[in-house]
Image (spheres, helix red, strand yellow):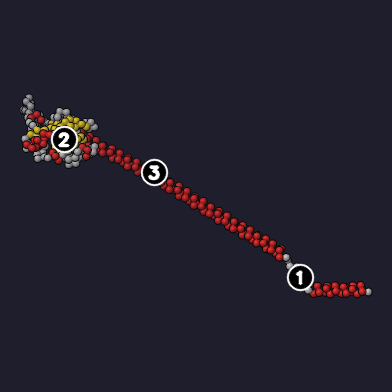
């Protein structure tokens, strides 16, 4: 009996408990603190790895962009260097052409100068030949005087040439020198002498110039070192055209001439005053003693 009562009580207690459960929501059990901390750490780890991955990707992209920019700069620098090298090569080529053109111009100018000199020489020679031909023609066509008989005695004609060197008594030597120009075929010795205060220039037997050339003799205030080849000497004093192409000759120098002002003697091309041969003037010791006596 007692057991039955206990069973009834237990059954009623279970029904009440069941009715209580149906009225109240069933609460889920809260997770344990250990499990929540592990999941949070794992989430933080995943987030950290994601951030690191993104940072790594960003750094890689930046490195790649920097590499591309550096490559572009290097390519631009190489292109600029190549352009400058081509420009420098072009300038060097232009400079070489300019130097070559100047050299060619100098050669052409020298050739033109020599051609002008040769043309002047040929023109003078042709003029002389023409004059000689005209003179011979005039002689051949001139009427003959039948009443005049040719004289066997030579006629004396007036001449403006100075007297031969042998007829002048030269007692004082002032200066002397020689011409030795194989290029223009001018050779011979010269001397300046004084006779009663008058100065004379004498050319000896060895003196010779090319036939057909119109030349003169002149003094210059420059030394031979100061006169370039085929140039016009400065401070020229023309003495006289040459009377003969070779042999002894004599010319009177201007009165009151001061030889100390002149350093060289020249054979001059009469057409353009170019020196064809020159000689230094070296005064002799007796010249000083003669000036003292005067």
Residue 157 at what x, y percent from top left?
A: 8, 31
Does residue 98 sit above or below 278 in this rendering? below
Q: Which residue is the site of mark 1?
A: 27
User: Mark 2 or mark 3, which is nearer to you?
Assistant: 2
Q: Which residue is the site of mark 3?
A: 93
3D distance between C-alphas at marks 2 and 3: 53 Å
* Quarter of the figure with residue 184: top left
* Quarter of the figure with residue 261: top left
Q: Which residue is the site of mark 2?
A: 282
Residue closest to the far right: 1
Badge 2 local density, few (<14 within 10 Å), some, or many (20+)? few
Q: Do the residues labelled 1 and 3 touch (CB within 8 Å)?
A: no
Badge 3 local density, few (<14 within 10 Å), some, or many (20+)? few
3D distance between C-alphas at marks 2 and 1: 145 Å
Residue depicted at 24% across the width and 37% down the height? 229
- The earlier-in-sequence mark between 1 and 3 is 1
């Amino acid at each position: 009996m007692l057991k039955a009562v206990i069973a009834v009580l237990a059954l009623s207690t279970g029904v009440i408990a069941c009715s209580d459960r149906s009225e109240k929501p069933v609460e889920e059990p809260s997770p344990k603190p250990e499990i929540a901390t592990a999941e949070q750490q794992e989430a933080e780890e995943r987030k950290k790895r994601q951030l690191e991955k993104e940072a790594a990707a960003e750094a890689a992209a930046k490195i790649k962009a920097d590499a591309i920019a550096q490559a572009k700069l290097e390519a631009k620098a190489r292109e600029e260097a190549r352009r400058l090298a081509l420009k420098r090569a072009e300038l060097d080529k232009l400079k070489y052409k300019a130097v070559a053109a100047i050299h060619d111009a100098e050669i052409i100018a020298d050739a033109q100068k020599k051609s002008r000199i040769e043309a002047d020489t040929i023109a003078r020679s042709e003029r002389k030949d023409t004059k000689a031909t005209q003179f011979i023609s005039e002689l051949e066509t001139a009427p003959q005087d039948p009443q005049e008989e040719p004289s066997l005695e030579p006629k004396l004609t007036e001449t403006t040439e100075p007297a031969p060197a042998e007829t002048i008594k030269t007692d004082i030597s002032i200066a002397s020198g020689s011409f030795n120009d194989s290029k223009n075929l001018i050779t011979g010795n010269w001397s300046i002498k004084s006779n009663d205060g008058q100065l004379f220039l004498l050319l000896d037997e060895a003196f010779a110039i090319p036939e057909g050339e119109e030349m003169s003799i002149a003094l210059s205030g420059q030394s031979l070192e100061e006169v370039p080849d085929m140039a016009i000497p400065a401070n020229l004093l023309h003495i006289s055209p040459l009377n003969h192409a070779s042999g002894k000759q004599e010319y009177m120098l201007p009165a009151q001439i001061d030889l100390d002002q002149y350093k060289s003697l020249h054979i001059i091309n009469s057409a353009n005053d170019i020196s064809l041969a020159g000689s230094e003037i070296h005064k002799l010791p007796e010249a000083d003693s003669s000036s003292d006596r005067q």
